[in-house]
Image (spheres, grey):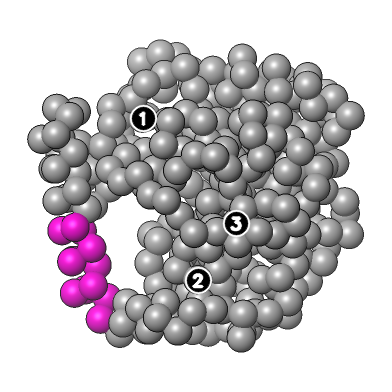
């Protein structure tokens, strides 16, 4: 595939913040839409500075996006953290006070971002997950609904926020237009995330080939935001240049009136905080002593803890299959 170096080479249209209706219509038809310069440059620069000041120097355990496990940071030769962190809104406020506050108040619940979400999901958004990327690690092909969604699957929307200009060789975020119209197999005993995650990933790759889906890796500048649907196949490309970073934030939102679907097995009424008028879910909130204790147990006894966690997931998937036949 050709990775565009400029807007002129990019087949993906870009919408201004004044044309949210146009972006929403494109999103409905194609499963994604890009809004140009939605976040001010100063917001992008500030959260990156707080990342550098508070998060990067930390050598302890944090929850990571790739595995959802408690891990230490993996740093490459350029000094970039290669295993992204999970849930900026939940990090320890004792260690990362300014980063947590700014990321939650000035990025995840930033007014114009919230307004686009509102148009895409037809309701005030409830933020249920976020991630921070610095290095250019690859992410496998997937649909978000396999991992999380609204209780009405397919309602969740997500946003990928470029905190810097993303070079073509930096391992760009990619999407498959109109793949939100495809229904892949649900979590089952043969493809569940606990024991057979690779089977699921391979099924997505095969579906891309089978249907001849287009893969687009849009050209994004600092402050641009790419929104996509929970069923849109997406990921990030392998980096072709280790000297290029990919500083970015992603967040996922469901309609505020809806409950949270986790791993297609549990529908949860989740407790949220209200920030800038937006409901924010803080999974494993490190402001709470009990969650800090759980993180410590995960870090000290990872093999036992994650073995038990896998057994619980398999049990829940099996119960769902028995109950629904899917």
Quadrant including the N terminus = top right
Q: Position of residue 57 (x, y in %)?
A: 63, 83
Q: Is residue 6 visible?
A: no
Q: Say which label, 2 or 1, has the lower sequence index.
A: 1
Q: Would you place residue 105 above or below residue 180 in this image?
A: below
Q: Residues within 10 Å of mark 2 (few under 14, many from 20)?
A: some
Could you tell me what secondary structure mostly forms the magenta stretch?
Answer: helix
Q: Residue furthest left?
A: 322
Query: Magenta residues?
Result: 301-312
Q: Are marks 1 and 3 in contact (CB under 8 Å)?
A: no
Q: CA distance from mark 3 to mark 2?
A: 11 Å
Mark 1 sits on what residue?
A: 204
Q: Residues within 10 Å of mark 3 (few under 14, many from 20)?
A: many
Between 300 and 268, the one lying in front of the other is 268
Mark 3 sits on what residue?
A: 280
| Helix, strand or loop status at disc 2 | loop
Q: Is residue 87 left or right of residue 11?
A: left
Q: Would you place residue 292 above or below residue 276 in this image?
A: below
Disc nearest the viewer among 2 and 1: 2
Q: CA distance from mark 1 to mark 3?
A: 30 Å
| Helix, strand or loop status at disc 1 | helix
């Amino acid at each position: 595939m050709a990775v565009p170096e400029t807007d002129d080479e990019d087949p993906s249209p870009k919408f201004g913040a004044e044309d949210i209706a146009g972006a929403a219509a494109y999103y409905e038809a194609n499963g994604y839409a890009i809004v140009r310069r939605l976040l001010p440059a100063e917001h992008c620069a500030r959260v990156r500075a707080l990342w550098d000041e508070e998060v990067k120097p930390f050598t302890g355990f944090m929850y990571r996006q790739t595995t959802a496990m408690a891990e230490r940071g993996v740093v490459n030769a350029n000094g970039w953290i290669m295993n992204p962190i999970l849930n900026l809104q939940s990090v320890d406020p004792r260690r990362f006070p300014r980063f947590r506050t700014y990321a939650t108040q000035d990025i995840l619940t930033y007014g114009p971002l919230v307004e686009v979400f509102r148009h895409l999901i037809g309701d005030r958004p409830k933020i249920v997950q976020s991630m921070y990327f610095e290095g250019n690690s690859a992410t496998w092909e997937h649909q978000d609904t396999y991992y999380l969604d609204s209780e009405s699957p397919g309602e969740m929307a997500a946003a990928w926020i470029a905190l810097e200009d993303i070079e073509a060789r930096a391992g760009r975020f990619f999407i498959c237009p109109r793949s939100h119209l495809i229904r892949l197999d649900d979590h089952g005993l043969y493809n569940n995330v606990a024991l057979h995650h690779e089977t699921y990933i391979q099924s997505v790759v095969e579906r891309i080939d089978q249907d001849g889906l287009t893969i687009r890796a849009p050209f994004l500048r600092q402050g641009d935001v790419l929104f996509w649907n929970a069923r849109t196949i997406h990921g990030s490309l392998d980096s072709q240049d280790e000297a290029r970073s990919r500083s970015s934030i992603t967040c996922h939102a469901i309609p505020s009136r809806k409950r949270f679907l986790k791993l297609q097995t549990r529908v949860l009424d989740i407790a949220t905080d209200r920030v800038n008028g937006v409901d924010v879910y803080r999974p494993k909130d490190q402001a709470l002593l009990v969650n800090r204790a759980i993180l410590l147990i995960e870090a000290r006894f990872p093999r036992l803890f994650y073995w038990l966690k896998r057994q619980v997931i398999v049990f829940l998937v099996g119960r769902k299959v028995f109950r629904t036949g899917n």
